[in-house]
Image: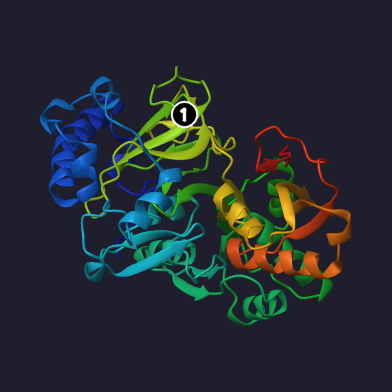
């Protein structure tokens, strides 16, 4: 457990940017060599490459991209980690499964996901009690925040998701001063507390992730007396970027090399241009080199006014592919295909994702012949959606040839202000 008395988590946050760049690229050749020696897939992906030559961004940009969207296929061929991890499953601390399924390793290291830095920037300190509302089941979200909070010396209540009345009761009994989870679930808890006429004003700070934080929702949570921060994390890479007191963009974590590339290619774009987030991680146990996340963002030109000197990004600006994040969980086009294959009556389908009062809603529109439009089929499809996607969704049966044929399996029409 690190004791801190500074505004900054450590001295890395205020490094001269030129020194940081030199340090990262001095570590990269070793990481490439390590990946080639200890990961079967990276031995193939990086075959013929001499790590000693990869000492700057131009050289890095010549390496092949590994796409998150290819992980399902890679892992099916070589379970559980697709040959990308540098440890055997038995050496891991935990193994997770995100929708897809995509399996992720967690190594035996304190704060493996590097979440403590983001929590610290959000004002979390030793002695805080954290009400953690990310799932501890299958996916790593709950554990990411839990481990980061433990590293800072916080006490954690592992609340997980759902059970809103019990959440409110626990908050009134335990009096946590901090919340971690999705912003929409925090809103639901605050609404439930008002409905029950229960005081949850002990909550003073929050670090949220897993979905967008619109300005209107930020204002609403601030008005409840909670100082809310956001961070951007994935199950493969851990914490990628986090908000500081300046609340102007998200600051990149210190253990990563970021590139923003033209979606579908490996070519870096100009500063400020929107492109796909590609990360090279210096994590030894899961050495992801040029890992394309499928998320879109853009670099902000200047350093943050808070004094941290690392690169800032605008935050999450959508998906480079049709994979989308709903209530903190990814839904892939392949999963929609898997739902349809269970029901021969459905000839064509499209998942539409929208928002209603900050809540994500997904509706699967299914084309079926008139005589097959039954409540039983609707119910069976809704059940399949929940089983395959691990999320509840509505199903709407429509006539054949009524859905657009524009190549979209998932149509995300959510608007963020």
Q: Is residue 133 shown above or below 327?
A: below
Q: 145 or 90, which is in the foreground? A: 90
Position of 54 relative to 132 (above/below) = above
| Residue placed most toward the observer, 154 or 399 | 399
- Taking 126 as reference, is 116 above or below it? above
Placement of the C terminus among the 4 image quadrants: top right
State the quadrant of the N terminus: bottom left
Quick check: 255 left or right of 354? left
Instruction: Residue at 43% x, 69% y: name it.
Output: 154
> Left of 305 or right of it: where is 325?
right
Q: Secondary structure at mark 1?
A: loop
Q: Residue at x 69, y 70 (%)?
A: 200
Which residue occupies the extreme top position in the image? 270
Left or right: 267 with respect to 91? Answer: right
Residue 237 visible in the snapshot: no
Residue 412 in the image: state x and y as whole percent.
69, 42
Please name whichever residue, 252 or 8, is drawn nearer the observer in this view of the structure: 252
Q: Is residue 48 visible?
A: yes
Colouring method of the image = rainbow
Residue 218 place in picture, x, y as percent: 68, 47
Relative image position of residue 105 (x, y in whole percent): 33, 61
Residue occupied by mark 1: 264
């Amino acid at each position: 457990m690190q004791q801190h008395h500074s505004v900054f988590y450590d001295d890395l946050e205020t490094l001269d940017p030129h020194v940081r760049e030199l340090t990262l690229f001095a570590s990269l050749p070793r990481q490439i060599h390590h990946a080639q020696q200890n990961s079967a897939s990276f031995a193939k992906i990086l075959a013929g490459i001499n790590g000693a030559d990869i000492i700057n961004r131009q050289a890095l940009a010549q390496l092949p991209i590994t796409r998150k969207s290819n992980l399902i296929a890679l892992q099916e061929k070589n379970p559980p980690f697709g040959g990308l991890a540098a440890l055997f499953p038995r050496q891991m601390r935990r193994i997770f499964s995100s929708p897809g399924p995509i399996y992720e390793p967690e190594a035996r290291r304190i704060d493996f996901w590097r979440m403590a830095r983001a929590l610290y920037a959000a004002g979390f300190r030793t002695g805080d009690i954290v009400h953690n509302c990310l799932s501890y089941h299958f996916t790593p979200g709950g554990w990411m925040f839990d481990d980061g909070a433990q590293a800072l010396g916080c006490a954690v209540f592992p609340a997980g998701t759902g059970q809103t009345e019990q959440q409110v009761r626990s908050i009134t009994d335990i009096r946590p001063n901090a919340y971690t989870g999705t912003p929409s679930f925090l809103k639901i808890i605050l609404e439930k507390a008002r409905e029950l006429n229960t005081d949850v004003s002990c909550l003073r700070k929050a670090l949220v992730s897993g979905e967008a934080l619109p300005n209107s929702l930020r204002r609403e949570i601030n008005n409840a007396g909670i100082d809310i921060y956001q961070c951007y994390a994935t199950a493969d890479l851990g914490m990628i970027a986090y908000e500081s007191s300046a609340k102007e963009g998200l600051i990149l974590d210190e253990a990563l090399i970021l590139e923003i590339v033209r979606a579908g290619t490996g070519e870096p774009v100009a500063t400020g241009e929107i492109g796909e987030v590609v990360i090279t991680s210096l994590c030894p146990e899961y050495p992801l080199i040029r890992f394309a996340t499928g998320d879109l963002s853009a670099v902000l030109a200047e350093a943050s006014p808070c004094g941290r000197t690392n690169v800032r990004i605008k935050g999450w600006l959508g998906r480079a592919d049709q994979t989308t994040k709903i209530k903190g969980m990814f839904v892939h086009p392949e999963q929609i295909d898997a739902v349809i294959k269970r029901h021969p009556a459905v000839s064509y389908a499209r998942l539409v994702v929208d928002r209603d009062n900050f809540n994500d809603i997904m509706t699967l529109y299914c084309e079926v012949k008139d005589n097959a439009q039954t409540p039983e089929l609707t119910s069976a499809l809704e059940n399949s959606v929940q089983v395959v996607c691990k999320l509840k969704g509505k199903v709407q049966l429509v006539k054949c040839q009524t859905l657009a044929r524009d190549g979209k399996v998932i149509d995300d029409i959510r608007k963020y202000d």
